[in-house]
Amino acid sequence: MSVHSNSVLEDQLEELNVAYQAALPNKLDELQEAVSGIFDEERPEDVREFLGRIASLSHKMAGAAAMFGHEGVSDSARSMDDLCSSLLAGEDASENNTAKNEIYDLLLRMRSAAAVSMGDRTAVSQPSSDIDDDKACSILFVDDGSGLLSPLRQAVDELGYRTKVVLTNQNVIQEIRDAKPQAVVVPTELGCWQSLCKKIAEQSHALSGAKTCLLCVSAQDDFDCRLTAIRTGADGFFIEPLQPEQFIRRIEELSGQIAFDPYRILIIEDDKPQSEHYAIALEGPGNEVRVVRDPRRAQFHIAKFQPELVLVELSLGYCSGLELAKMIWQTEAGKDLPLLFLSPGPAFNQELLKLGLPEELFLKKPINSDELRIRVMGQIMNARRGASSPSRDCLVAALNNRTILSRLQKSLGWKDESCPVAPTERPAKIEKTPTVLVVDDDRFIVETIAAKLEDRGIKVMKAFNGEKGYHLALVNSPDLIISDYQMPKGSADYLLTRLKINADTRRIPVLILTAKKVGGRKDFALEREMLGRHGAVAYLNKPIDWDTLFSELRNHISF
C-alpha cells in the first residue's frame, strides 16, 4: 500500500474520530432522555418501552465507542444493554427500582468515562457549545417512542446541528413554543401524523414568532401520502433513506438561510504549483474548490465532493487527461459531469483544429486568472440551467473513436505502447473489483468500515437497517455482506432469512459483526445460531480486529 494511500485513509479515519467525539455528548443526552423515562411515576406502563429504547441506544454505543477509543463508555454501555435486556425478559420491569438505579449509575459512569477519554469534562456535561448559534439549525423530531427517525436524527447531530425529540404523548405545540425550532419533522408512520401536521401548520407561526418548516418523512413514495402532506400544510416531503446533507440543505433553503448555492469545482492537476495557482484563481465567495493531484483518487473525490465541474490537466503523469475523462464519464457519478481540459501546448491545439473538435472545452495555456474564472463559471451556469452540451457529446464520441483518441494521445506525448492494452496485444484478464455491502445502524461504524475497505480497493455499498440491506443485496448482488446483528427495521436474523430463501441472494456470504456479549464474553449461543441455522460464514465481535476481519474477507473475495 502506498504512502499516499495510507495518508488518505488516516485522514478519513481521523475525520470520523473527530466527528464521533463531537457527537458523543448528544448521544449521551439522548440516552439520558430515555433513562429519565423509567423514573416517570405518572407513566409506569411506559417503562418497558423506555427500557427497549435504552437497550437499543446502549447496544449501539457499545460497538461504536470502543472503535473510537472510548473503552470505558463501551464497557458501561454493554452492561446497560445486558441489564435492560434482562429486565425486558422478566415480568416486573416497572417495579425493579434497584435495577433502575443501577441503570442510572451506569449512565453516570459513561459520562465520567467519556470525560476522561475526551480530556474535557465540559464536553459531556452539556451539549457541545462550539456550534455557531447563528448557523445552527434547531430541528424538532416528533416520535412515538419507537425511534422511527433515530438514524436520521443521529446523522443530523453528527453534522453539528441541534436536535430534540418530542414524543406524541407530550404537548407538541408547547414544545414548539419552548424550543422555537426552525423545522419540525414528522414521520408518516405515526398514526396521528395527519392531524398533528395540520395542528402544527396552523399554530407554529404564531407560537414561535417565525416561520417553522414542517417536514414529513415517509418510508415509501406514495402519491396519496404526498397529497395529504400538502393538504395538512407540510413544506417538504422526504423519502427514506435520505442523505442528511440534502435534508439539512432543504431546511436551510426553506428557512431562508441559503441565498446562493456555492459552485463546487474539482481540479485534477499533478503539478503542485500549477494546481495551487488554479485553486487561488477560482477560490472566493460562492466557490468551493478541491484539488486532487493523484488521478487514481479522482473517482473517490468525485463521489464524495460531488463537483459541478472538473478541471483536468491533459498531461498527467500517471495517465492522460483524456483517459481519465473516459473513466469519469463511464461512471454513474460522472456520466453527466462537465469537464474542462487544460491544453498542454501548440501541438495539441493544432491537432484539435485538424480533427474539428470543440475548442470551448479546452483551455489553452498560458491562461490568465480572469479567463479561467469566466470559462469555469460559464460552464457551471449552463449546467445549472440544464443546457445541453453538443460540444461535450462531440468530444465523448471522439474519445470513443480509437483512431482519433490515438492521434490526441500522440499530441500529448503518449505513445500507443504506453496504453494499458495495445491494439495488437491480447487483452489481459481483468479482475472484477469486489463489492461489499456494509449493514449497520451506526453511521460511524459503517463509514469507518467503508474507509478501510475502500483503501484496499474494495467497492462498498452502505445500508443502515436490515430491510434496506436486503433491498440493496437483491438489486446489486454484492460479493459479500458485513452485517450488524441488532438493528431497527430488520435484525441479522431477518436479513439472513430473507437472503437464504431467495435463489438470487442465497449464495452471498454474510459476516456477522456485533457488540452483543454475555457477561462480558462472546455470546456463543448466538454465534452457533448465526453460523448454523442462519448460515452466516463468520461471527466477529466489536470492537473490530481489522486483521481478523480482513483474514475472513480473503476467504471469500480477492483484493
Image: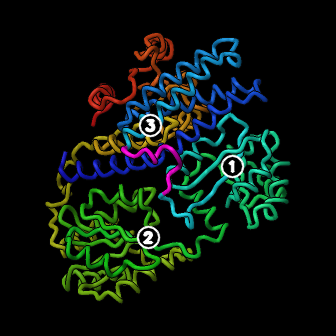
Front of the two marks 2 and 3: 2
Closer to us: 374 or 68: 68
Q: In which quarter of the image is the C terminus?
A: top left
Query: Residue at coordinates 55% horizontally, 51% vertically from top-left?
Result: 156
Q: Name the residue under label 2.
A: 264
Residue depicted at 19% across the width and 59% down the height: 419
Q: Which of marks 1 and 3 is nearer the N terminus?
A: 1
The numbered mark at residue 463 is none
Identify the residue position indicated by label 1 in the image: 217
Dominant SS of magenta comes to loop
Which residue corresponds to the image point at 79% horizontal and 39% vertical from the top-left?
A: 169
Which residue is label 3 attached to? 437
Chain-order first, disc 2 or disc 3: 2
Q: Is residue 453 above or below residue 223?
A: above
Q: Is mark 2 on a helix, strand or loop?
A: strand
Rendered view: 419 above or below 429 = below
